[in-house]
Amino acid sequence: MSGQKIKVGIIGAGSRGILSFGKTISTRDDAQVVALCDPNQVRMEFAAKDLGLKLNFYNSVKAMISTEKLDAVVITSPDFCHESNAVEALNNGVNVLVDKPLSTTVKGCQNIIGAAEKAGKTIMMGFNLRHHAVLKKLKKIISNGVLGRVFLIENREFYDGGRTYMSRWNRLYSKGGGLWIHKGSHDFDIFNWLLDFPKPVKVSAFAGVDVFKPQHIPFAVKAGVPVGPTCHQCSYSGICPDIYKIDDIQNTPWGDRAVAVDGYSKDLCMYTSDKDTHDNGIAMVEYENGVKASHLECFVTSMSDRLYTVIGDLGQAEISLGNRIITIRPRWSQETITHFIPEVLGGHGGADPMLIDSFFKVLKGEEKNTSTTEHGMWSTAIGQAAEISRREERTVKVAELFL
């Protein structure tokens, strides 16, 4: 594709598809967004306006691909649609960039992998954290042997914005496969990537909704004055400390006009909404080489940061993604070595533009695809095992998912 403008269709007209992928692609000289696909016409209209582009709208992937001469699609639809959307694109000879997760199940991942092999097209995972400058530096430190043989790794993610998962479609297991997949797939992939992809063997997880329940509403509820159902309709919006405020919501893709099309409200009360995911949890993984990993997710917090610890037999590293700091502690020394990583412009600490740039370089033959569907499958496998573990209260052998 070198020398020609790459024509792209975006599947999923939500914030991720438009504000992250769409806006970044629209600034490039080698690519252009030409079409949108989403079941909600209103949201596509807002999306085109946000991008400042005249785009063709489609309600089905099949219709978009059969009409447009696309070189690639970007899939940012709800997670449970990733499999069908990716397979449809691949079966029709279109390259794919799919935002994490690849699918909500190992079986779904295998179906996508089969379609990609048959089609002979490129499909790349949207694991944007791999492109974060701090984690790229950490990867280099580990690969250069500074920490020696790594045997223990952890990540603690505190995410204030994560509370809004309880307001959005992510709150439903049927839509995202659970937050160990929708959210955790980022972090499980980082473990796999940092460790050079050993096979995960066993997973145990504990999680639940411990705060965002009706009985924990953080203000006095008056008799006869119900809470919700959405933040912009709620009588308590002025006093709720957890309000999910969308400015001028009626002039956004999430206003009542869009809701009337498909019934989806983005700002449901996070306390009274129906939900079957978690607002906090811990997952533990053991790999075939004996490395042990733990991942904590907490969405009940006033801070947002990913804090990593990586321990090897020559030393350990402590990382704050938010503060962009890596601290190395050599094993037999009291000294510390601190790396301060400069800010990079762009979403997710500059990672989003780097991910998109990598995808187009792969399409043009300038770079090898190093974020593969196999990687996506193993990330999903850990997440799916974690969901089974926490729901069935047992340790899950990852091999169970491949039977």
Image (spheres, helix red, strand yellow):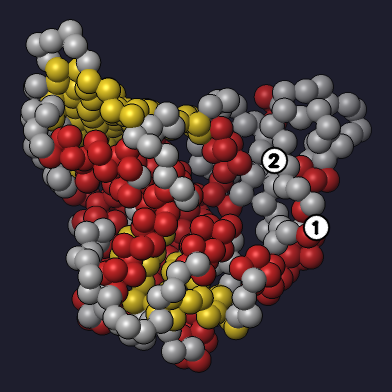
Q: Is residue 292 left or right of residue 179?
A: left
Q: Is residue 58 above or below residue 108?
A: below
Q: How many marks overall?
A: 2
Q: Is residue 218 visible?
A: yes
x then y, percent, for residue 185: 36, 47
Query: Disc 2 and disc 1: Cα gap in Å?
Result: 14 Å
> In the rendered view of the protein, which quadrant contains the N terminus?
bottom left
Task: Identify the element where label 2 is drawn.
Answer: loop
149, 216: nearer the viewer: 149
Residue labelled with disc 1 = 250
Q: Position of residue 137 (x, y in %)?
A: 25, 39
Residue located at (38% from left, 32% from top) = 324
Question: Is 317 left or right of 29, judged from the image as shown?
Answer: left
In front: 224, or 267? 267
Counting residues from the start of the chain, the first of labels 2 and 1 encountered is 2
Location of mark 2 (residue) = 244
| Residue type at tag 1 | Gln
Residue 397, visible in the rendered structure: no
Tag 2: residue type? Answer: Tyr
Mark 1 residue element: helix
